[in-house]
Image (spheres, helix red, strand yellow):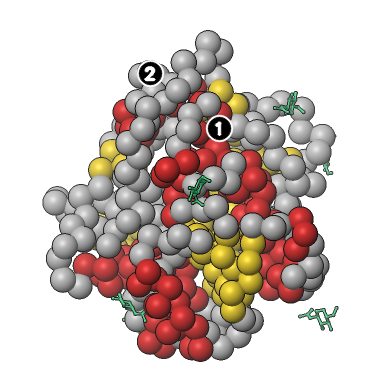
Amino acid sequence: MWQNTITLSLVCAAAAATANQILFPNTTGPYRVGSKDLELVDYSRNDIYSPLPQLRDLMTTLYYPIHDNQTTCTIDTLYTPLLATYLDTLVSAPLGTFKKFALPSCVNAPLARPDLPLVLFSHGYKGSRLLYAGFLQEFASHGFNVLAVDHPYDALVVEYPDGRFVYNTFDESVAGAVEEDLNVRVQDMIFALNSMNNSTITSQVPGLSSSKRLQTSRVGILGHSFGGSTTLQATVNDTRFVAGTLFDGPFWGFANKTGTDAPIMLLAALQPSSEDWVTEWTTTWPLLRSFKRWFDVAGTLHLSFDDIPLLADLLGADLSESVGNVTGTRMISMQSAFATSFFNQFLKNETDGLLDGGESEQWPEISFVMD
Ligand SMILES: *[C@@H]1O[C@H](CO)[C@@H](O)[C@H](O)[C@H]1NC(C)=O
Ligand SMILES: *[C@@H]1O[C@H](CO)[C@@H](O)[C@H](O)[C@H]1NC(C)=O
Ligand SMILES: *[C@@H]1O[C@H](CO)[C@@H](O)[C@H](O)[C@H]1NC(C)=O
Ligand SMILES: *[C@@H]1O[C@H](CO)[C@@H](O)[C@H](O)[C@H]1NC(C)=O
Ligand SMILES: *[C@@H]1O[C@H](CO)[C@@H](O)[C@H](O)[C@H]1NC(C)=O
Ligand SMILES: *[C@@H]1O[C@H](CO)[C@@H](O)[C@H](O)[C@H]1NC(C)=O
Ligand SMILES: *[C@@H]1O[C@H](CO)[C@@H](O)[C@H](O)[C@H]1NC(C)=O
Ligand SMILES: *[C@@H]1O[C@H](CO)[C@@H](O)[C@H](O)[C@H]1NC(C)=O
């Protein structure tokens, strides 16, 4: 039932690139983008998964618009060492390949627009916040401050600045584990949001200060797979999450009984991981009491909604059996276009008609299922 586990078994066609870095594509939105890693320690909460007493400790990355006139730009390695090695093995790439990937975004550049809306992102089970960086930087370039959160012990591996690391140990076969893990994930998202309103923490971000603060009273949330379940539940547990988007995420947890008052958008793989998900979406749909849209995306599989399609393109590898037939660049521009339209509507009060069928000739892969 945890189909979002990354199980790619294929051979990477490409030889190792000779350059030191393999750059992700440039963003296409009106804003240039910066990024900043932040470690968030929750002093009020022990980590229930840790074998030894340990505070819940989150690694996060904030992606954000920077000033047009930013002159210096530091480009840094995207993947942390253990994650990079894991990915090399996963796709049978020469050891050291994934260490070369980098985003063109400017690491630690000053955040330019604290007035723009904040949106939080939750990864899939056994995923990583870093496996969505291509999408997240593109989405930020369209005018959002975006915080991506890792969920330790559920994520594939989380690596901290001091060298500590935590692999996935979560046991999905234990009864009640789904609900418990979902609740921990929602606590993570609420704590991450609280932290974005804590100037002791945000003062680490160049451009923010006690007088230049992020907008934390009305924010968006989005996620892939189990991160989609997290999204739906977070809108019920904390009404600061005013709107949510799910990328092929099942409607799990108690929110599938209570429903939500928040606007919800679902972009679903045309062949989702399980037929049950389609039944679950259909069953819970009437309990979504605000604006709602469900779109299917032709040519996609469950793993199309992370950066793997783009990584396959950059490596020249054919991973279509695992990630479908839509190219990585196309996936990212689609996810970003729909998320931008949705969050513009509910966080900026701007509508462009995309979610009502406008520009449908530009997105032939997208089919409207339900509202
Ligand atoms: C990305 O933008 C930079 C700076 O504007 C430019 O030098 C570079 O060629 C662009 N890269 C690609 C792949 O278009
Ligand atoms: C860059 O632009 C911002 C606002 O657009 C301005 O506040 C800042 O002074 C400018 N910096 C430089 C070095 O010109
Ligand atoms: C979310 O709400 C449910 C139902 O009221 C509750 O059991 C759970 O503890 C809440 N979780 C968080 C993180 O607030
Ligand atoms: C803000 O963050 C600091 C550093 O983690 C912490 O000590 C403090 O308790 C936080 N403040 C609030 C109001 O949570
Ligand atoms: C943010 O923190 C301030 C105190 O530092 C508090 O007055 C305000 O209500 C908080 N806002 C939100 C949205 O939590
Ligand atoms: C509700 O979520 C539970 C997991 O928490 C799942 O087993 C069940 O199938 C879901 N029901 C619907 C209608 O989505
Ligand atoms: C991808 O294309 C192949 C060949 O046309 C087809 O068999 C397969 O079903 C497609 N995959 C998806 C996810 O649409
Ligand atoms: C949103 O825009 C509409 C039309 O432009 C306007 O009628 C409405 O008052 C606005 N709502 C908010 C909350 O600004």
Quarter of the image for residue 35 reads top right
Disc 2 packing (10 Å; few <14; some 14–19; many ≥20): some
Q: Position of residue 92 (x, y in %)?
A: 35, 26
The quadrant of the picture occupied by the C terminus is bottom right
Question: Given the image, on which type of amino acid does mark 1 rest?
Answer: Asp
Quarter of the image for residue 66 reads top right
Residue where numbered disc 1 is placed: 313
Q: Mark 2 or mark 1: which is in front?
A: 1
Residue where numbered disc 2 is placed: 94
Check the image and report above or below for 243 versus 14: below
Q: Residue 128: which disc?
A: none
Q: Is residue 55 left or right of residue 278?
A: left
Disc 1 packing (10 Å; few <14; some 14–19; many ≥20): some
From the viewer's side, name the closer residue of 22 and 119.
22
Q: Position of residue 16 (x, y in %)?
A: 46, 15
Question: What residue is rendered at 32% in x and 56% in y?
Answer: 3
